[in-house]
Image: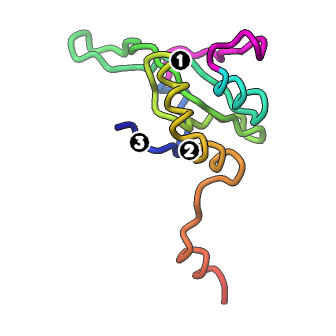
Amino acid sequence: MLPAPHKSLLDPDAIFASREIRFQGRGESQYTLLMRLCTDFNLSVLQLQRKLFSHLSRKTVPGAMEFILATRDETTNQWYSLSPGLADLKSLDDYAKRHEVDILHLQLFGEDIDLQQLNDGFY
């Protein structure tokens, strides 16, 4: 079972390579939900290759390719992952369908604030 969506910072030093996947036309895409999330809600689909440490060569080597749903903070230009890394776009589209409400809540309202922390801040 894949975990529920949450926002986590993507460390650029831990990524070997990345590229943003662009969806062209609404009628042509087979991943309609991913395309809608990207065009209507300012999310992005990134293809990543993370760095892995090889104990055999004692060097950093590229890991397997993965796809994530991400958002970029315009003020800091940092990327935040909203989904776990998945092997292909079909799996990411299925994940987005299962967790669409949670993903949109994260994008539109941010992380849930702990009510106790909120109450501690007031008199």
Mark 2 is surrounded, within 10 Å at the Cα level, by few (under 14), some (14 to 19) or many (20 or more) other residues, namely some
The numbered disc on residue 89 is 1
Mark 3 is surrounded, within 10 Å at the Cα level, by few (under 14), some (14 to 19) or many (20 or more) other residues, namely few
Is 102 contained in the magenta span? no
Check the picture and name the quadrant holding the C terminus.
bottom right
- Looking at marks 1 and 3 on the same chain, the residue that comes earlier in the sequence is marked by 3
Q: How is the image coloured?
A: rainbow
Secondary structure at numbered mark 3: loop
The numbered disc on residue 7 is 2
**Dot 3 amino acid type:** Pro
Q: CA distance from mark 3 to mark 2?
A: 12 Å
**Dot 2 amino acid type:** Lys
- Looking at marks 1 and 2 on the same chain, the residue that comes earlier in the sequence is marked by 2
**Which range is magenta?**
15-31
User: Looking at the image, which residue is at 63% across and 48% down?
Assistant: 106
Residues 88 and 117: in front is 88
Check the picture and name the quadrant holding the N terminus.
top left
Q: CA distance from mark 1 to mark 2?
A: 20 Å
Callout 1 touching callout 3 (CB < 8 Å): no
Where residue 29 sits: x, y (%)?
68, 13
How many marks on residues? 3
- Disc 1 or disc 2, which is closer to the eye? 1
Residue wearing tag 3: 3
Where residue 96 sits: x, y (%)?
56, 33
Question: In the image, is 98 to the left or to the right of 23?
Answer: left
